[in-house]
Image: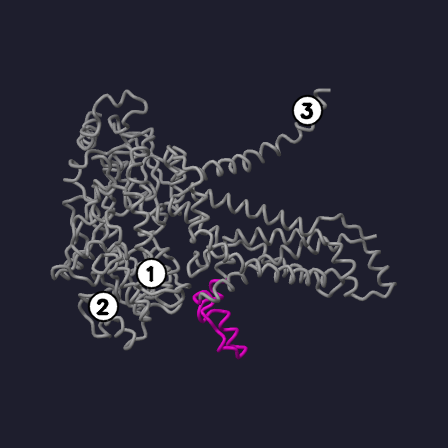
Amino acid sequence: MIRRRQLLGAGLALAAAAVVPGCTGGASDEPDGDSGDFSGEVTGPITVLTNRTDLTDTALPAYAKTFVSKYPGTKVSFEPVTNYEGDVTTQLSSGDYGDVLLIPNTVAVDQLPQFFAPLGDLTELKAKYRFTDEKAYDGKVYGLSLGGVANGLVVNKRVWAQAGVTAPPKTPEEFLAGLQAIKDKTQAVPFYTNYKDGWPLSFFNSQRAIVADPAFNETFPADPAPWQPGKVLYIADGLLFDIVHAGLSEKDPLTTNWEGSKPMIATGKVATMLLGSWAVPQMRDAAKAAGANPEDIVFWPFPYQAGGKFHSRIEGDYKAAVSRNSANKPAAKAWLDWFVTESGFANDQQSVPPTVEGELPTVLRQFQETGVELVELPAATTNAGKEDEIIKESEIDLAGNIYRQKLVDIARGAAKGTKESCFAELNKRWGAAQSRVM
Amino acid sequence: MTLRSWRPWLYLLPALALLITFTYVPVGNMVWYSFHKWDGLDPVMDPVGWDNYVRVFTDERYWRVFLISLYYFVASFAQIAIALYFAVVLSFSTRFRNLFKGILFFPYLLNGVAVGFVFLYLFQPGGTLDTVLRFLGLGDHTKLWLGDPDVANLSLAGTSVWRFTGLSFVLFLGAIQSIPGEIYEAADLDGANRWHQFRYIIAPGIRRIISLSFILAISGSLAVFEIPFLMTGGANGTRTFVIQAYETAFQFRQIGLASAMAVVLLAVVLLLTWIQRRVLPDDEVTLS
């Protein structure tokens, strides 16, 4: 009995250490106070919302079992949500959204305190966890990353080698020449956009680190015209335009299929896709299933160098948070801490470990060895939330696919315009919204 | 006395309660949202007056998408014509008429997602449609059915016709079958052929249903969502007004602006219906 108490105490101390600066005392007496108080016995049931519907019956209960054996008396149940962003956003306004959940990206940073309990001070947690500033507001952290991803190209290196390219291209021009060589020398589709599913196009927005400017997120909202030569969006979106314009992408973008694209790249029918490092294990699985060599699938950096070096942005995937309305905050917090630090989830998923001292998984170690610097871009602080506001105001979905689909349409001659007219229009709309927001 | 005057309301109560809770209150809410700037989450809504409406009417991106509805509107004439033709033919005694009725109505029973996927495969390069065309020796006429912006809307409108013809067909067939049989007999005795029977008996007899079909066609073509959303996601110039509103509301979290778009859509549908009723007044039909 005593032993169990001590164990609990240890767990609590850990939780408390992270929280002490967060609660300024006395919060526990107020029914609806600061909500950053996690003191109490770790016991009883909690509900965890998850987007990983594929793991709900397999891996997640296994993690839960380990957790329960560490904290007897707790019970973890999972609520899988297929359409996570949309459904959970609606659930948020109802007030009932489980105890631990992933923060939907629809929640603006200044709204975080309305829905989630603060987990601790940014300055404090930063020393222990990566990606803490992505869901922080007013110096408090509201969500912890479950694992990070690096951004770059998933390639089938066998196909690239057939075209005579064995090392990652260093400039967009070199890259386009490589794609052209693939088109000329092999049967493969050089670059697959996944236009129909749309979201894979959003990775052209994830290449923000290529110019190696650590203050990028801070200065970005202050720029009324981000689609100008030399700027990140011009380089990335411009590359997309050039690829499609030169006929180096799939023939009919309207009938692409994400699930179908995995075996295609795995077997060498497609040579290249722009995605995150998380996609590598999935493509390798597809290769195994199709009887192809999984080692053909490798991860290359975006073809642009600053100061003679590749830079790839690493960023947190969904951040997990504790509901502000949770009836069992101690257990919820204990689960969150345990899942992030001890469960091994990040390594199982081959993602960047959420803790600072964690080791990189194999895929990313190999990626780093190609001479890439992994860069964590700090979130904006003085301009926090401004970028989101401009996106909403201008209806230019930087983190989405709508305007990029239009860009692809123009590039393949299915809509009127040129690269320059398209970027001019984007600059105009963005600038108009930016002046209303800033 | 009092009980008696209350009684009808008592019977109406369940229906009224449901109608008010699930129709009028949400519509009222929507109108209320449309005068605010709100992201759907924040407890505070900023009142902005008529700003949202001004944006819907002045920003080209919002009202241009209405033009896409014209494709579906034109297609709905084809739909009504096909449905009417088959309803008339199958209302006479034709061989296998029940089988054909089933075949025609079947697409309407399929759910929209299934229809979307079936047609997605049909329209793929080298998909079913291309294969059939090649088999018929029309291989030169294959196109990127969804990828070519000049054809994409026609493909989608065609899908919509395929799906909803069954509904119009059943409406017409029901109306035709309510015409008493003696009238046909009398017409036969007078030497009327099938065309005369259609022209002077069936067409006037089902006028109300035809006019209802047009109202449904107008509101339906303005509010197209499912088929283009599933098949192209609104890309490649197939974005309809409702897809635009959906994106505004759920991708860009501008609930106020999207509500204003929905109110505008409602007003447009009401207006067109009213005009249509004025042009074609709903006279009582007598067949005697």
Reply yes or no: does residue B227 show up in magenta. Answer: no
Name the spot of residue A432 as percent of width and height, x first: 32, 49
Name the spot of residue B215 as percent of width and height, x first: 62, 51
State whether discs 1 and 2 lie on one chain: yes
Q: Quadrant of residue B105?
A: bottom right
Look at the image and give the residue range highlighted in magenta.
B119-148
Along the horizontal axis of the image, is B94 left or right of A311? right
Q: Is residue A342 visible?
A: no
Name the spot of residue B266 as percent of width and height, x first: 54, 45
Q: What number is the disc on residue B6?
A: 3
Front-lying residue, B232 or A382: A382
Q: In this figure, which residue is indicated by the disc labeled 2?
A: A175
Mark 1 Cα shell of 10 Å, populated few (<14), some (14-19), many (≥20):
some
Give, as a three-letter code, the residue at label 1: Cys
Mark 3 Cα shell of 10 Å, populated few (<14), some (14-19), many (≥20):
few
Q: How many callouts does the rendering have?
A: 3
Distance Cα–Cα, label 1 vs label 2:
23 Å
Q: Is residue B142 visible?
A: yes
Q: For numbered disc 3, what is the local secondary structure? A: helix
Q: Residue at x 30, y 50 (%)?
A: A431
Front-lying residue, A144 or B17: B17
Q: Chain of mark 3?
A: B
Mark 2 Cα shell of 10 Å, populated few (<14), some (14-19), many (≥20):
some
Q: Chain of mark 2?
A: A
Foreground disc of the pair 3, 1:
1
Q: Residue at x 63, y 61 (%)?
A: B103
**Can you name the residue that lies furthest to the bottom here?**
B137
Q: Residue at x 32, y 25 (%)?
A: A32
State whether discs 2 and 3 lie on one chain: no
